[in-house]
């Protein structure tokens, strides 16, 4: 069953080398992510699953040791998912989608060693019902399961945002923030997938996987960080 979850934003800018001159701007977000990962470690999980969104052709599971890279963003930095130095035996070496690579970087920064781990990339367009079902499956994987859920809110919060300004974005992100703060699976499940797609909210599918996993867990939540420094909603939350 699910015993803890951390929700973190997934921009490559979290990695200081990729942020260049803006590295300090997300310092508070990085600190909040570290605090959220400490909650995961304290929960003593038997299994940690890193969940993030991806294109349909990259969706699926990624074993511990799977490689990731930030080279497409002009940074000579590579990561592996977890402490393993090599990919799992007999497993194809697929490159981690960016949200999972950012999660792998956070785990390496935290020197994660509390439990075995793996990655799950869900298609950005995955319907809500299928996200919830995937979460239920994850929660049943072990007696004590923890999730690191990587995803952003709307990318249309300001005129300079990647998707330009959409006046609906602030309300969507406020609803997501409340759900994350309250550890409210029903409220996360109620987020509209179509609206999320229009608002470029890449975290919708991973958040709804979390909602499915947490349905009967009775967890309490804390929102550790909320901001939109580049016109994109970033949230950090800890459920335990």
Image (cartoon, rainbow, N blue to C red):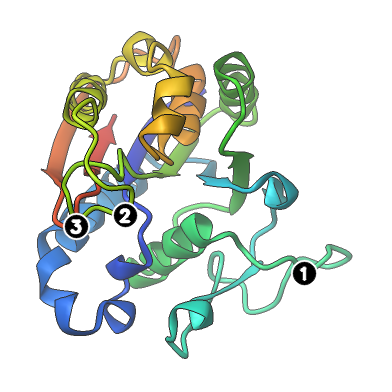
Q: Percent position (x, y) of residue 191?
A: 38, 17
Q: Earlier in the sequence, mark 2 or mark 1?
A: 1
In which quarter of the view is residue 93 placed? Answer: bottom right
Mark 2, residue position = 162
Mark 1, residue position = 93
User: In the image, is residue 79 above or below residue 129?
Assistant: below
Do the residues bearing badges 2 and 3 touch, measured as CB atoms within 8 Å? yes
Do the residues bearing badges 2 and 1 touch, measured as CB atoms within 8 Å? no
The local crowd at label 3, few if under 14, some if 14 to 19, many if 20 or more residues have their Cα within 10 Å, is: some
Is residue 133 found left or right of 100 in the rendered image? right
Is residue 52 found left or right of 22 in the rendered image? right
Q: Percent position (x, y) of residue 167?
A: 18, 29
Per the image, label 3 sits on a secondary structure element best described as loop
Query: Given this view, does label 2 or label 1 mark the residue nearer the observer?
Result: 2
Mark 3, residue position = 230
Which image quarter holds the C terminus?
A: top left
């Amino acid at each position: 069953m699910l015993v803890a979850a951390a929700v973190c934003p997934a921009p490559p800018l979290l990695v200081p080398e990729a942020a260049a001159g803006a590295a300090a701007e997300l310092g508070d977000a990085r600190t909040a992510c570290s605090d959220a990962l400490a909650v995961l470690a304290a929960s003593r999980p038997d299994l940690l699953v890193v969940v993030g969104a991806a294109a349909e052709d990259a969706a699926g599971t990624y074993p511990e040791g799977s490689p990731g890279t930030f080279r497409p963003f002009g940074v000579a930095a590579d990561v592996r998912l977890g402490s393993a130095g090599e990919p799992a035996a007999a497993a194809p070496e697929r490159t981690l989608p960016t949200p999972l690579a950012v999660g792998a970087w956070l785990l390496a920064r935290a020197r994660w060693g509390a439990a075995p781990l793996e990655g799950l990339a869900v298609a950005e367009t995955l319907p809500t019902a299928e996200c919830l079902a995937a979460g239920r499956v994850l929660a049943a994987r072990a007696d004590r399961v923890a999730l690191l859920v990587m995803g952003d809110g709307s990318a249309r919060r300001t005129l300079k945002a990647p998707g330009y300004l959409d006046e609906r974005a602030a309300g969507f992100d406020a609803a997501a923030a409340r759900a994350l703060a309250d550890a409210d699976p029903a409220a996360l499940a109620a987020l509209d997938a179509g609206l999320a797609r229009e608002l470029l909210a890449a975290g919708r599918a991973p958040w709804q996987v979390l909602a499915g996993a947490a349905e009967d867990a009775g967890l309490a939540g804390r929102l550790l960080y909320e901001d939109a420094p580049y016109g994109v909603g970033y949230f950090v939350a800890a459920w335990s």
